[in-house]
């Protein structure tokens, strides 16, 4: 019996474990289903340079405590810093992202159409906020941004029935103001700020997976690889019938548990409501004629939704990779590809309330869910690192 049993060696599990070590606690085991650690943030080499399995991964600069922690494994001198240059391919041209700040880059006729639609968007007319996802997008952004970009892009990423999704996760999007958009079009310049990753780090010599690999190496044989978690007994805190601990830290998707003993039946049914989407990444060796690090493609006749322009952020590399929802992906033997079964936890209606019930119940049994899957949230890696550090610090 160990003090801690950590399920999953992605950024959440690796951070929690390494933070324990920093505090002098080494009575723990990590179980990982694959033969290597890093989860969605793993990298491999394709065509001589790094390729990030899980899609485009960039380290946001904003959390100093997280950077200090990660730089202990991979010093800042081993990272490049970039200003974000992301684009959208729409109406047969490239414009900068986010769309609402860069309508001025479209042709004049398009600008007029977008402005007309924004002027009568529900939020600008003071109409009540709708509850269904599709209506909400129209209300918030106007019919042009909704129909030409947000709805097709979200359908490509998350699946066809967008009304299954809640709107709570979009509530921080700013209203698209008619006045600001008009001024931006007249002055021919963007307004507002980048939503995320305005500045970010990416390793100079390696893929994004390197820092997590080093964290895993630091744990040595405390990680047991190729051990897929299948069952858990919450009352005895035993996993796969053989690993027991005082405290269990879960970072793996709940769908992975074929058996959960000791869970109230009502809570068990909530686990079945948790949904996710899968993403396939595929490598292409051609360079692209762009400075952008990544480009969004709302056009539904293209299977992929985003392209990562590898040669613009990965030293001495060439080519790009695509991100495609698994349900839209058609395998092409000419290009290496990787399936990420668990890519996006879906923000379905009622999910936050259901997760709160699940997490409270687990905590009452000394089992803690953390990270993208443990909490079923769209967390980026810097966020999960912070949460895992804080949780480890909460144990004495
Ligand atoms: C397309 C895409 C782009 C992203 N871009 C960024 C970005 O630019 N910047 C950023 O910071 N973040 C980004 N993220 C988010 C980032 O991937 C996550 O925040 C991070 O990987 C979460 O870490 P985690 O440990 O919680 O989950 P994961 O990385 O999913 O790790 C979970 C671990 O559990 C293991 N596991 C699963 N099932 C089992 C089982 N049954 N038994 C044992 N082990 C199991 C997995 O193999 C994995 O190692 C992106 C994610 C996606 C999908």
Image: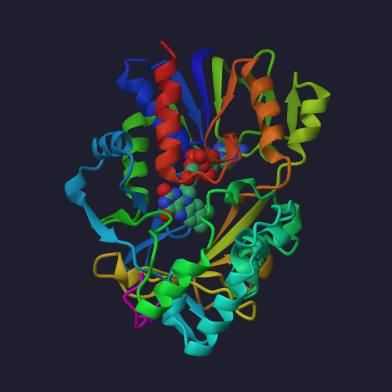
Which residue is nearer to you in this view: 204 or 165?
165
In the rendered structure, which segment of residues is drawn in magenta? 282-292
347 vs 188, left or right, is right
Q: Residue at x 36, y 30 (%)?
A: 219
Numbered label tally: 0
**Residue 357 in the image, given as x and y percentages of width and height:** 70, 26
Q: Quadrant of residue 7?
A: top right
Tell whether position 102 is magenta: no
Which residue is outermost to the left? 77
Question: Relative to 128, does residue 247 appear above or below in the rendering?
Answer: above
The colour scheme used here is rainbow
Q: Is residue 322 visible?
A: no
Q: Residue at x 37, y 36 (%)?
A: 216
254 vs 393, left or right, is right
Question: Relative to 48, does residue 136 appear above or below in the rendering?
Answer: above
Position of the N terminus, as image quadrant, is top right
Q: Residue at x 36, y 28 (%)?
A: 18
**Residue 350 in the image, given as x and y percentages of width and height:** 73, 40
Q: Residue at x 62, y 68 (%)?
A: 142
360 vs 52, left or right, is right
**Residue 366 in the image, given as x and y percentages of width and height:** 60, 15
Q: What secondary structure do most residues of the magenta stretch adopt?
A: loop
Which residue is nearer to you in this view: 116 or 206?
116
Q: Quadrant of residue 227?
A: top right
94 vs 200, left or right, is right
**Residue 385 in the image, given as x and y percentages of width and height:** 41, 36
Position of the C terminus, as image quadrant, is top left
Tell whether position 291 is magenta: yes
Q: Is residue 269 visible?
A: yes
């Amino acid at each position: 019996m160990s003090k801690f049993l950590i399920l999953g060696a992605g950024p959440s599990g690796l951070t929690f474990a390494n933070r324990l070590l920093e505090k002098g606690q080494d009575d723990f085991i990590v179980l990982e289903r694959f033969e290597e650690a890093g989860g969605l943030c793993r990298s491999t080499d394709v065509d001589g340079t790094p390729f990030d399995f899980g899609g485009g991964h960039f380290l946001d600069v904003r959390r100093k405590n997280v950077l200090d922690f990660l730089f202990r494994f991979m010093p800042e001198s081993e990272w490049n810093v970039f200003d974000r240059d992301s684009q959208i391919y729409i109406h047969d041209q490239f414009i900068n992202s986010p769309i609402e700040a860069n309508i001025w880059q479209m042709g004049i006729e398009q600008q007029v159409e977008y402005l007309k639609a924004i002027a009568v968007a529900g939020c600008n007319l003071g109409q009540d906020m709708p509850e269904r996802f599709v209506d909400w997008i129209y209300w918030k952004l106007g019919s042009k941004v909704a129909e030409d970009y947000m709805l097709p892009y979200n359908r490509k990423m998350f699946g066809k029935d967008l009304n299954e999704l809640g709107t709570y996760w979009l509530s921080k999007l700013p209203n698209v103001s008619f006045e600001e958009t008009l001024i931006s079009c007249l002055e021919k310049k963007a307004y507002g700020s980048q939503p995320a990753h305005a500045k970010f780090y990416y390793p100079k010599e390696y893929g994004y997976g390197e820092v997590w690999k080093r964290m895993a190496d630091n744990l040595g044989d405390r990680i047991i690889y190729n051990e897929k978690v299948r069952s858990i007994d919450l009352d005895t805190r035993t996993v796969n019938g053989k690993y027991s601990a005082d405290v269990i830290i879960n970072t793996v998707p709940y769908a992975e548990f074929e058996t959960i003993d000791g869970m109230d039946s009502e809570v068990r049914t909530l686990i079945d409501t948790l949904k996710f989407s899968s993403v396939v990444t595929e490598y292409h060796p051609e360079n692209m004629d762009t400075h952008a690090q990544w480009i969004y493609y709302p056009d539904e006749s293209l299977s992929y939704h985003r392209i990562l322009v590898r040669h613009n952020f990965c030293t001495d590399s060439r080519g790009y990779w695509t991100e495609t929802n698994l349900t839209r992906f058609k395998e092409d033997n000419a290009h290496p590809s990787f399936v990420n079964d668990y890519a996006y936890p879906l923000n379905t209606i009622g999910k936050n309330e259901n997760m709160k019930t699940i997490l409270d119940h687990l905590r009452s049994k000394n089992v803690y869910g953390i990270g993208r899957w443990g909490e079923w949230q769209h967390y980026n890696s810097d966020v999960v690192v912070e949460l895992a550090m804080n949780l480890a610090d909460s144990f004495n």
